[in-house]
Image (tube, rainbow, N blue to C red):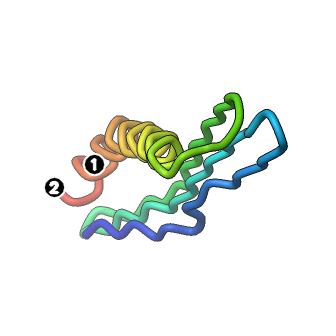
Amino acid sequence: GVTVEVKEFNTHVDQGNLRYTLNSKIQAVVYVQGPRGQYNKTFNATRSQSGAFNASNDEIQKVLGETFKDIVNNIYQDVTNAINQYTN
């Protein structure tokens, strides 16, 4: 089986008078366990964005969504081989 444990999933917003900075981070640990062994690996993805004036909820959601896509792609590329190796 495959288990994904999400350790961190957030966006930190620094907002000043004229500029804002968004820093998103996702950390997940993937565990693969099968009849032929086990595998685990920690994955991290980060994104940052800066802009003028105030950060909107849409911008925060966009940055976090892009970070989520990054980590899912990284997991997919890496874990597919482990699933085939340990569970088949």
Taking the image as shown, residue 17 lies to the left or right of residue 44, namely right
Q: Nearer the viewer, residue 73 or 77?
A: 73
Q: Amino acid at mark 2?
A: Asn
Nearer to us in this view, 47 or 30: 47
The residue lying furthest to the left in this view is 88
What SS does tag 2 mark? loop
Determine the residue positioned at 50% across, 41% down.
59
Q: Report the amino acid beneath label 1.
A: Gln
Residue 78 place in picture, x, y as percent: 39, 39
Q: Is residue 66 left or right of residue 17?
A: left
- 3 vs 26, left or right, is left
Identity of the residue drawn at 55% across and 61% down: 9
Circle 2/circle 1 CB separation < 8 Å? yes
Q: Badge 1 local density, few (<14 within 10 Å), some, or many (20+)?
A: some
Expressed as whole percent of the image width and height from the top left, the position of residue 45 reads 57, 43
Q: CA distance from mark 2 to mark 1?
A: 6 Å
Q: Relative to the observer, which residue lies in front, 21 or 26? A: 21
Give the quarter of the image for residue 20: top right
Q: Kindly identify the residue that appears in the image at 22 percent across and 47 percent down.
A: 84
* Left-right relation of 31 to 8: left
Looking at the rendered structure, the secondary structure element under dot 1 is helix
Mark 2 highlights which residue? 88
Q: Name, please, the residue furthest toward the right.
A: 17
Q: Where residue 2 sits in the image (x, y, percent)?
A: 30, 66
Image coordinates of residue 65 in percent, x first then y, are 42, 45
Placement of 66 over or under 34, stated as above or below = above
| Residue indicated by mark 1 | 85
- Identify which residue is drawn at 30% across, 41% down: 81
Q: Which mark is residue 75?
A: none
Quarter that holds the N terminus:
bottom left
Crowding at dot 2, Cα within 10 Å, few <14 / some 14-19 / many 20+, comes out as: few
Q: Quadrant of the C terminus?
A: bottom left
